[in-house]
Amino acid sequence: MAATDTPLHFLTIHQAGELMRKGELSPVELTRACLDRIADTDDRLHSFILLLADDALAQARIAEAEMLRGDYKGHLHGIPFALKDLYDTAGVRTTSGSRVDIDRVPTQDATTTARLKAAGGILLGKLAMHEFALGGPDWTTPFEPARNPWNLAHITGGSSSGSGSAVASGQCLAALGSCTGGSIRGPASLCGIVGLKATYGRVSRAGVVTLSWSQDHAGPMTWTVEDTAYMLQAIAGHDPKDPTSSRAPVPDYSRSLKEDIKGVKIGLPRRYFFDDDPSVNPEVVATVEQAVAELQSLGASVQEVSLPSLDYVRAANTVIMVCEAYAYHEPNLKTRPQDFGEIVRGRFRIGGMLTASDYLQAQRVRSWARREFADVLKTVDYLVTPTMTQPAPAFAGYDPTATIRGRSFTAPFNVTGLPAISIPCGFTASGLPVGMQIAGKPFDEPGVIQTAYTYQQHARWHETRPPM
């Protein structure tokens, strides 16, 4: 039995790895603890679409044998993880949360899936998601929406809903989400965990079902910043199967796990992200303001910056997204529309009604935003904002169109392709998590990680777990 007072399912990747390296914990023991946690909680959380218990235990036994003979693969060796159900898994059903793909069984792993397995990770199963990474929560799709472990009456955010719920509740130590307008950072914020969208092209999307090819990102969701760094290390890097994959060298992200932001310049886009607006919760803003003050106390300087393109970026994100989604899904929308859920079918059809002019104007806004953000990031090192406009809404009375109306604090970084991370920075008076977003220059994941890690180690919000 592992020598730890922390329940095994609540260990971080870092903690579990240290115990396994010392021979005080086996991958089989850790995998069983996660499977037990899933058995105890998933009838309420609905995080998993498909559980691969037997396969996971078989892989854990292999990892255990490898460790016993001294063949240690690194930080992810023996670590149980799960995948949003749009990551292809060879021989294992991948549904994208839709009746359209309910029987789809890929013949190859996604590149990210293969890389996590090669790093020694133990795949527990496939996670719930909003249908085709856009529509939800929607009861007209085949699967029950995932629920928030901080309050089961509340949503997790989307579209990586099961990924947020599973990591936050201790069902797995890490997960992969996908992000087109905020679908990694949003659930991370609402579920009180860490979510990273790296620079566009940093992580391969080969074998990840497309929503919007020019805005889709794949990335990790974990409990801590260091765990996110370990996951990113495993999946980052060029992939010839993905034509948008960058050839930029991959640094050692573990070197960024140090507490030092003295002299760092933080840009605060106060207008849009922090100003008074009916769609923005003042408690969220106040919580992030306090976190910014703590960054200052740790040695960072803060200055306000102006980004006028923000008034148009959300619309550009949505237009590009639904146009590209319609192009991808058009054959099935024409031949089997009844198999789509009501929400996603309606949103995809909007893409079919927009014109080439609409799409090109959105791309012009994108070019403007990229230039403007690049200019601002010449004067500051990082941008800091709230991750979400609201804490997790309740299911009761929730309006799913809210996700495409009003402000989005995450979409600007999908449109520009800049790296952005969400980390916990506090709670509302009702006990719901609040996330702070830190974004940086292209391929400056090391700096984003170091800034987030410095704050995390000071604030210690990651030490508070959901009450369930």
Image (cartoon, grey):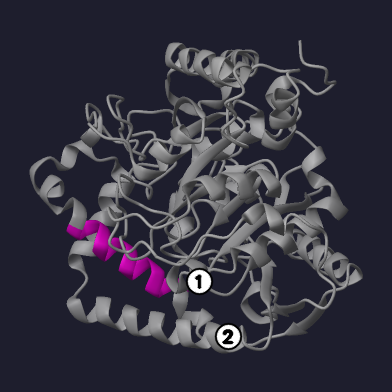
Viewer can see residue 134 = yes
Q: Quadrant of residue 52?
A: top left
Q: Is residue 324 left or right of residue 464?
A: left
Label of residue 307 in the image: 2
Q: Nearer the viewer, residue 355 or 63?
A: 63
Amino acid at the residue labelled 1: Pro
Height in image: 164 above or below 290? Answer: above
- Magenta range: 314-327
Height in image: 206 above or below 164? Answer: below
- Residue 179, percent from left and from top: 45, 54
Q: Quadrant of residue 437?
A: bottom right
State which quarter of the image contains the N terminus. Answer: top right
Residue at 61 percent across and 34 percent down: it is 167
Q: Is residue 280 left or right of residue 319?
A: right
The residue tagged 1 is 412
Q: Is residue 100 left or right of residue 432?
A: left
Q: Secondary structure at mark 1?
A: helix
State which quarter of the image contains the C terminus. Answer: top right
Q: Quadrant of residue 143?
A: top left
Residue at 80 percent across and 58 percent down: it is 455
Residue at 36 percent across and 39 percent down: it is 87
Q: Secondary structure at mark 2?
A: loop
Label 2 packing within 10 angstroms: few (<14), some (14-19), many (20+): some
Height in image: 185 above or below 231? Answer: below
The residues bearing labels 2 and 1 have C-alpha atoms spaced at a distance of 10 Å
Q: Please identify the dominant SS of the magenta region.
A: helix
- Residue 96, percent from left and from top: 33, 38
Q: Are marks 2 and 1 in contact (CB under 8 Å)?
A: yes
Sequence-first disc among 2 and 1: 2
